[in-house]
Image (cartoon, coloured by chain):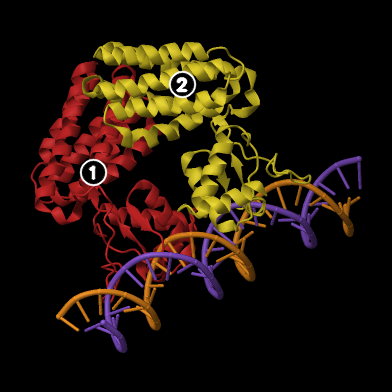
Chain colours: A red, B yellow, C orange, D purple
DNA sequence: TTCCGTCGGCTACCATACAAGTACTTCAGT
DNA sequence: ACTGAAGTACTTGTATGGTAGCCGACGGAA
């Protein structure tokens, strides 16, 4: 009920139902609240959210384009399992775009840009000390977006964000476990330092190393949670659950 | 009628109505058959294509995500004008991804890859001699896609393709006019030569120069056809056409 | 026991009806 | 003639009904 009320309240603030449902489902998938392989029925979701099937359906279509769900006509819609190829592809896209933007940033970035990036680093340190991984995730997102903006390429961020979503699903599994937040912050700091010193190759290497470390983290997670990954390249046609469907796990 | 029949026939081959309408509208927009600023009414399109509003609407939502149409709620949907920022953003994304893929290709590409690329160069030369710009456009698309595949990054092509769409709309205006096809082919050839010689920086510079030349071409077109561009960053709220709506220009 | 046809329930897909909102037109009042 | 407010014709957004198709379970035949 609370989520439904919030949905209708937000709808009054210029966003339509489709966008709200889209954002809600997207965050639930990335946070693994909706696990890979879970069935997403248009009817069930519409009933749970208190809206009609239309905006739910349109949201699922968009999520399908993003690669976060797989739609099998006349069969069902399922949260996509994390595929090896998707991970590699997302990493390539992210690395290419973020590093290219950074190279422009090294020459273009202003003192204001650097100051805002350093403010985010301080906030990240505070989040680490509070042991608040959710806040750190948001700040990490802001940091990388701000870094691209410093190079004059803020418009390309949505593309990176979409690729990043695939990686984040896997990262969420590890972040509460690890004490690596301080390592990530030091890597972020190194990037800003190199940026401020206008060191083109230094900044590039610092960011690339950071991004690849995140990538290798995913591989270690793969060993711990193989059930969330899909080893086969061919899409796994999920079996229909014959028992009483649970729908969204925490809906009640 | 013919298009409707083709639509229903294709639907039997595993593609649903939404995908067909999406592809149809996308090609019409990129080919400038639907000009920037043109109104796209869900009702009119549905009637012309002989389908209901639902798949048309879903297609327009997807085109909106791609930046090819602007949807103004309760007002209308319009083919987006070519915006300075969108062009620059698309160029950045394309250059970053294609060049990054090429750098991997220089070390990874096999003789088979090079052979297929050269076959495409031959076909491009033939298209030039036939003075068939449409065929050249398709071959250009295939060449760049194949180039990324040689680096092992075929999965990233759709992202490039989406960015490329913005640039292609402008290029279509110039290509029939210019005799520059031979120049483009020689640039393509240079890239393959450098790739075959495993010259990392040489290949990068060759491709980057080629892509930027395409980019500057757009600027010259901007001077010739300013009405298709949108100078203001703020979105132009289009005026509603009060006379009898023509709908899709060449529908009859 | 094993195999095959049938049936029931579920799915996404498409079509259609209704609601909310915008902009232009028209016409009354000044 | 000019201003302004109601009316009208359109738009997209949302809700709901109906259809084709897929899957898994059930039951009879070999």
Residue drawn at 41 percent across, 58 percent down: A21
Position of the N terminus of chain A, as image quadrant, is bottom left
Residue B96: x, y in percent? 34, 25
Q: Is residue A226 above or below residue A145?
A: below
Residue drawn at 31 percent across, 53 percent down: A27
* Marks 1 and 2 belong to one chain: no
Badge 1 element: helix
Q: Is residue B64 above or below residue A1?
A: above
The label number, if any, that marks residue A75 in the structure image: none
Nearest to the observer: residue A252 or residue B223: B223
Position of the C terminus of chain A, as image quadrant, is bottom left
The label number, if any, that marks residue A167 in the structure image: 1
Circle 2 marks a residue in which chain? B
How many residues crowd around disc 2 within 10 Å: few (fewer than 14), some, or many (20 or more)? some
Q: CA distance from mark 1 to mark 2?
A: 39 Å
Number of callouts: 2
Residue drawn at 24 percent across, 34 percent down: A119
Residue B39: x, y in percent? 65, 43
Confirm whether residue A105 shows in the render.
Answer: no
Nearest to the observer: residue A10 or residue A26: A26
Quick check: marks 1 and 2 in contact, CB under 8 Å?
Answer: no
Nearest to the observer: residue D8 or residue B215: B215
Confirm whether residue B229 shows in the render.
Answer: yes
Residue bearing the label numbered 2? B123
Circle 1 marks a residue in which chain? A
Residue B126: x, y in percent? 50, 18
Badge 2 element: helix
Q: Nearer the viewer, mark 1 or mark 2?
A: 2
How many residues crowd around disc 1 within 10 Å: few (fewer than 14), some, or many (20 or more)? many
Residue A86: x, y in percent? 26, 43
Q: Quadrant of residue A116?
A: top left
């Amino acid at each position: 009920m609370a989520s439904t009320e919030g949905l209708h309240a937000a709808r009054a603030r210029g966003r339509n139902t489709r966008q709200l449902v889209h954002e809600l489902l997207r965050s639930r998938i990335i946070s693994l609240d909706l696990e890979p392989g879970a069935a997403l029925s248009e009817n069930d979701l519409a009933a749970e959210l208190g809206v009609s099937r239309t905006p739910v359906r349109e949201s699922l279509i968009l999520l399908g384009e993003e690669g976060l769900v797989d739609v099998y006509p006349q069969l069902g819609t399922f949260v996509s399992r994390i595929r090896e190829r998707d991970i590699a592809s997302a990493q390539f896209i992210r690395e290419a775009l973020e590093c290219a933007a950074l190279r422009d940033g090294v020459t273009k970035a202003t003192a204001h840009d650097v100051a805002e990036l350093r403010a985010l680093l301080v906030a990240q340190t505070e989040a680490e000390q509070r042991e608040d991984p959710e806040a750190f995730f948001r700040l990490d997102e802001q940091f990388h977006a701000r870094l691209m903006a410093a190079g004059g390429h803020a418009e390309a961020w949505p593309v990176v964000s979409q690729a990043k979503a695939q990686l984040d699903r896997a990262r969420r599994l590890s972040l509460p476990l690890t004490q690596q937040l301080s390592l990530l912050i030091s890597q972020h700091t190194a990037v800003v330092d190199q940026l401020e010193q206008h060191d083109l190759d230094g900044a590039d290497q610092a960011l690339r190393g950071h991004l690849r470390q995140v990538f290798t983290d995913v591989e270690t997670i793969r060993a711990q949670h193989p059930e969330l990954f899909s080893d086969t390249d061919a899409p796994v046609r999920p079996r229909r659950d014959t028992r009483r469907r649970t729908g969204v796990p925490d809906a009640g």
